[in-house]
Amino acid sequence: MLVDNRVGAGGVVGSQWVTQQKPDGRTLLAVASAFAVRAAIDRSVPYDATKDFSGVGQIAISPSFMVVSASHGFGSLKELISYAKKQPRGVFYTSAGVGSTAHLHAAAVAHLAGIHAEHAPQRGTPEAVTDAMTGRVLYCFAPGPNAIPLARAGKLQIFEL
């Protein structure tokens, strides 16, 4: 098996590449749950998620964690929300791309908390987590394998929702 990790645009880059391969059963695409969401909210994706692909099965389940830079020193999610509401120009959050699960989670938090927050999408999860860890954005959502080691190292703080 050869793994060709084609990241970018919340999975669109790799997905488009797969549609250009011969449909002989030798090319598999592993996607996050946001795959179908992206196609539903962005009509410009260069494929039809329901016609150009055939589902095979679920590989894994990965919880998503809200993370912020440990340097902020928030004691709770309530403190983060209070801080964000006091910012006259609002705050920024990031994600692995428009329509990604992390994007939808982060936007929902902003909406439900009444925070003025702007999305600053990244190329992928590692870049998004780095932006949160360094404080370039206030928060993001990340899967456990990306968030937990950095939280244990004291670089990220994980919030319960």
Image (spheres, rainbow, N blue to C red):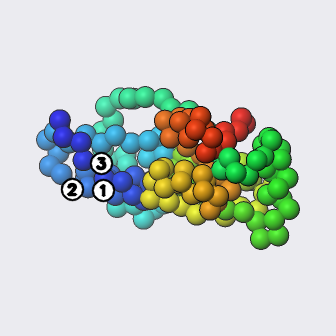
Element type where label 2 sits in the image: loop
How packed is label 2: few (under 14 Cα within 10 Å), some, or many (20 or more)?
few
Measure the alpha-carbon separation of dots 1 and 3.
13 Å
| Residue type, numbered disc 1 | Gln
In x, y percent, where is residue 6?
Answer: 31, 53
Q: Is residue 49 left or right of residue 34?
A: left
Question: Which of 115/156 is in front?
Answer: 156
Asked if marks 1 and 2 touch (Cβ < 8 Å), the reply is yes
Q: Which residue is mark 2?
A: 20
Q: Is residue 144 above or below residue 129?
A: above
Q: Which residue is mark 1?
A: 16
Q: Residue lying farthest bottom?
A: 89
Q: Is residue 115 left or right of residue 120?
A: right
For the C terminus, the quadrant is top right
Q: Is residue 25 above or below residue 94?
A: above
Asked if marks 3 and 2 touch (Cβ < 8 Å), the reply is no
Q: Residue sitting at 38 percent across and 29 percent down?
A: 59
Numbered badge on residue 5: 3
